[in-house]
RNA sequence: GCAUCCAUAGCUUAGCUGGAUAGAGCAUCGGUUUGCGGUACCGAAGGUCUCAGGUUCGAAUCCUGAUGGGUGUACCA
């Protein structure tokens, strides 16, 4: 349930009854525990427009606050309204949620479409760490939108077009002619280097490569066949990575750059018709207001650029897919580019005016010393190697504990390693650069995936030990139960917030808070010990179970799994 | 040069619809246990929120300027 909206509605009707016409201002969590659970600060800002003092306004409004959700209200300081939530009401809300498969979260019934463009690897090379953040963040947002009932269209805008492909397919052809298998393609990085070396040293090969670029673009079927073979192999590499990462991108989500090729001449045509084009140095450009650097949609030699492709993609997504919201999960360095294409797409009418176009920008991944993440010799780190290392390191951290079966150990190590990797990324504000630190992400201490997975496993252990059916009611008694209960009800508020601002770190922050509250509850409130009466036991078990379900659901949105035993 | 983003504790950071004593984690120091998983919990210490102005009853938050840093800057993507 949306706890805050509920409280806000109560305040709104109180304002109405007090005949105060106020803009909506949301309640916030109380800053200190003496101030209750929530506080409304609107009285102070209303004071000026109403011409009276804020304490009087607050007192007046508080007279009209009447709801069984609220235990008491106090006026404090210059005009804060402090609000305490009633335990009976809280208990009944929690009991409703425990009976709901969706944890009481309402879903969007209009089935609105949201496009999430993420990952977008280049087919010429293997995926490297530079693709990690886009892939993880994009997948999380897609999961969230889907969970909230929206129709999510994942789009993997792979880079499968451009001059380097001439070189690559020419080299592929050569290998084929020499009767070798495609083994070379198993290591795409290596393949790329070999092709490049040949291109630089062998003039006739270089010529063939250049001819092939022209041929592919001209639709030559032989060259396109080779190209397709190359792309298929390269894409298979990506799928291996997605599979290991537990990311839900599939072949069906691929909508390659090249698929927009046919639209490009028409895009430029339309831009010309609309009078947006200026020819500068032979290139077709669009100059944005107050901007010196233009966006080039067609080169002086007639070729198209990625801006043109992005415009075509925008048009496709708005007009064919009918997306209401389009999110581009792309490195912050491209913000200028997106600002430009978004502006042009609206100006040219490629995209409906009410469609939300968002660049979900993120910062660079750094190593512990704060420099861009590289291998020891300065090369790019292959993503698949990074994932394997995460799993190996995870195995080290858990295998010392107790002997697990090999299969179980493998599975657990994967869940923990990949979970740690994702969580570390998602738990920081995506816009800042992110410091990659193995020790930190695989620690049980602090805001990590492992802490949450541990809390989850601990609850499962209790439920196993209890080994019975959970029949009863949650009945909130203590302060810590009150806090835990409120946190559980707040889940939807948080999801809604992340929906709005596309900031997954708000969700991780919430989950950490929830897990911490549970640990406190666990210390203070014995569940299975002797002397606990049946009703209290059931209430606490149900609270624990609901906490576990919430953690599991939250992590699931982040693309992170849980295990029953660690 | 121009554009744009950023600056919070030793480190990593939360907080950005202006609100009460700026909130965490790591590291440091101290404590809790006849224990439902102690890989836990509790506590202490640690801050001129880069600096200087301004708006306001009230500013880490909004505005202006300065300093330091990141990134981008027309026929690559």
Image: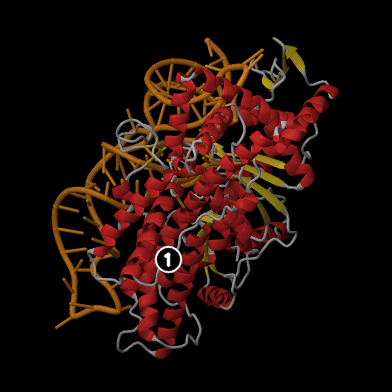
Residue A459 appears anywhere in the view: yes
The residue sitting at the right extreme is A273
- The percent coordinates of residue A205 (x first, y second) are 53, 23
The structure residue drawn at horizontal position 42% and vertical position 72%, both measured from the top left corner, is A481
The residue tagged with tag 1: helix, strand or loop? loop
Image height check: is A257 above or below A43?
Answer: above
Q: Residues within 10 Å of mark 1 (few under 14, many from 20)?
A: many
Q: Chain of mark 1?
A: A
Residue denoted by label 1: A562
Q: Where does the image place residue A129, in percent across and percent down from the top left?
A: 43, 40
Q: Nearer the viewer, residue B22 or B34?
A: B34
Q: Is residue A178 above or below residue A163?
A: below
Can you say which quadrant of the picture contains the N terminus of chain A?
Answer: bottom right
Residue occupying the point 32% across, 66% down: A409
Nearer to the camera, A487 or B56: A487
What x and y, as percent, mark residue A550? 49, 67
| Left or right position of A498 against A365 | right
């Amino acid at each position: 349930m949306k706890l805050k909206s509920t409280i806000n509605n109560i305040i709104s009707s109180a304002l109405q009854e007090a005949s105060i016409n106020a803009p909506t201002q949301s309640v916030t969590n109380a800053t200190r525990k003496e101030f209750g659970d929530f506080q409304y600060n609107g009285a102070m800002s209303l004071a000026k427009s109403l011409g009276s003092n804020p304490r009087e306004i607050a007192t007046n409004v508080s007279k009209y606050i009447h709801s069984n959700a609220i235990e008491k209200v106090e006026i404090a300081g210059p005009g804060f309204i402090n609000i305490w939530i009633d335990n009976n009401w809280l208990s009944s809300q929690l009991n409703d949620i425990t009976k709901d498969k969706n944890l009481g979260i309402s879903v969007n019934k209009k089935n609105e479409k949201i496009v999430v463009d993420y990952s977008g690897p280049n087919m010429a090379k293997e995926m490297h760490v530079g693709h990690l953040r886009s892939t993880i963040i994009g997948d999380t947002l897609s999961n969230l939108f889907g969970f909230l009932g929206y129709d999510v269209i994942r789009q993997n805008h792979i880079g499968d077009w451009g001059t380097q492909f001439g070189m690559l397919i020419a080299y592929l052809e050569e290998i084929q002619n020499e009767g070798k298998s495609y083994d070379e393609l198993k290591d795409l990085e290596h393949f790329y280097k070999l092709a490049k070396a040949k291109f630089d040293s062998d003039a006739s090969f270089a010529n063939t490569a250049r001819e092939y670029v022209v041929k592919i673009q001209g639709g030559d079927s032989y060259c396109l066949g080779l190209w397709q073979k190359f792309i298929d192999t390269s894409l298979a590499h990506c799928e291996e990575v997605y599979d290991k990462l537990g990311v839900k991108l599939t072949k069906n989500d691929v909508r390659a750059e090249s698929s927009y090729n046919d639209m490009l001449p028409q895009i430029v045509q339309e831009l010309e018709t609309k009078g947006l084009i200026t020819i500068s140095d032979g290139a077709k450009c669009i100059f944005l207001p107050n901007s010196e650097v233009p966006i080039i949609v067609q080169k002086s030699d007639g070729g198209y650029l990625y801006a043109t492709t992005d415009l075509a993609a925008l048009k496709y997504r708005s007009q064919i897919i009918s997306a209401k919201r389009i999110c581009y999960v792309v490195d912050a360095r491209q913000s200028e580019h997106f600002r430009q294409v978004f502006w042009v797409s609206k100006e040219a009418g490629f995209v409906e005016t009410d469609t939300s176009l968002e660049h979900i920008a993120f910062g660079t991944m750094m190593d512990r010393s704060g420099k861009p993440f590289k291998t020891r010799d300065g090369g790019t780190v292959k993503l698949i190697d990074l994932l394997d290392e995460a799993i190996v390191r995870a195995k080290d951290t858990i295998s010392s504990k107790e002997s697990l079966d090999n299969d179980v150990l493998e599975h657990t190590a994967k869940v923990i390693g990949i979970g740690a990797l994702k969580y570390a990324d998602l738990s920081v504000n995506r816009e800042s650069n992110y410091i990659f630190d193995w020790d930190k992400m695989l620690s049980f201490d602090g805001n990590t995936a492992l802490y949450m997975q541990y809390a989850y496993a601990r609850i499962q252990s209790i439920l196993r030990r209890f080994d019975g059916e959970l029949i009863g009611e949650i009945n909130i008694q203590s302060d810590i139960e009150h806090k835990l209960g409120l946190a559980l009800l707040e889940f939807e508020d948080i999801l809604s917030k992340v929906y709005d601002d596309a900031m997954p770190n708000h969700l991780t922050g919430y989950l950490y808070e929830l897990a911490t509250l549970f640990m406190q509850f666990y210390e203070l409130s014995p569940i299975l010990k002797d002397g606990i009466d049946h009703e209290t036991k059931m209430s606490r078990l149900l609270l624990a179970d609901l906490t576990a379900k919430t953690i599991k659901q939250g992590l699931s949105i982040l693309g992170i799994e849980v295990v029953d035993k660690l």
